[in-house]
Amino acid sequence: MKPSCKTFPNKRFALFKWGKDAALPETGADYLLFDAPVAGSGQTFDWQELETQNFTKPFFIAGGLTEDNVADAIRFFSSLCGGCIQWGRDKWNKKIKKR
């Protein structure tokens, strides 16, 4: 199934351009999306900056995910979230297989 807005009916997302020393503000969003400071640049952000955050909502990451680093992202976020990575895993597995 191709992801779309219909996949998350009546849900709100909050986009955070994540950089060094960023802080997680209060939000009424249902989901959080973390991207590099310059969205669309193809650059990653330092995922370890998220380790100190207290997440109470599901989140997604974006920004510079490639076949070269997606396996690292899966390992990192699986340990951070206790294995919560689900959505997008098929797409990531395809990127890993391209290596």
Image (spheres, rainbow, N blue to C red):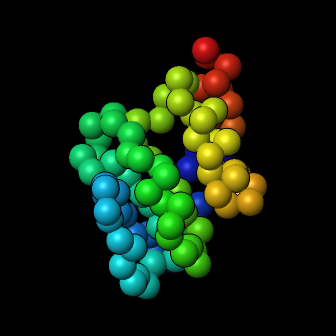
Image location (x, y in percent) of residue 91: 62, 35
Residue 29 figure quarter: bottom left
Image location (x, y in percent) of residue 67: 55, 24
Camera-nearest residue between 39 and 13: 39
Residue at the (50%, 67%) spot, across then down: 52
Residue 1 figure quarter: top right
Residue at the (69%, 51%) spot, across then down: 78
Q: Is residue 20 above or below residue 57?
A: above
Work out which quarter of the rendered image holds the C terminus and state it. Answer: top right
Q: Is residue 5 visible?
A: no
Q: Is residue 23 above or below residue 83?
A: below
Q: Is residue 39 left or right of residue 60?
A: left
Residue at the (53%, 23%) spot, across then down: 68
Image location (x, y in percent) of residue 9: 55, 71
Residue at the (49%, 52%) spot, across then down: 48
Q: Is residue 82 left or right of residue 57?
A: right
Image mark count: 0
Residue found at the very far right of the displayed protein: 83
Residue found at the very far left of the displayed protein: 38
Q: Is residue 93 above or below residue 33?
A: above
Image location (x, y in percent) of residue 49: 44, 57
Residue 94 figure quarter: top right
Q: Is residue 68 visible?
A: yes
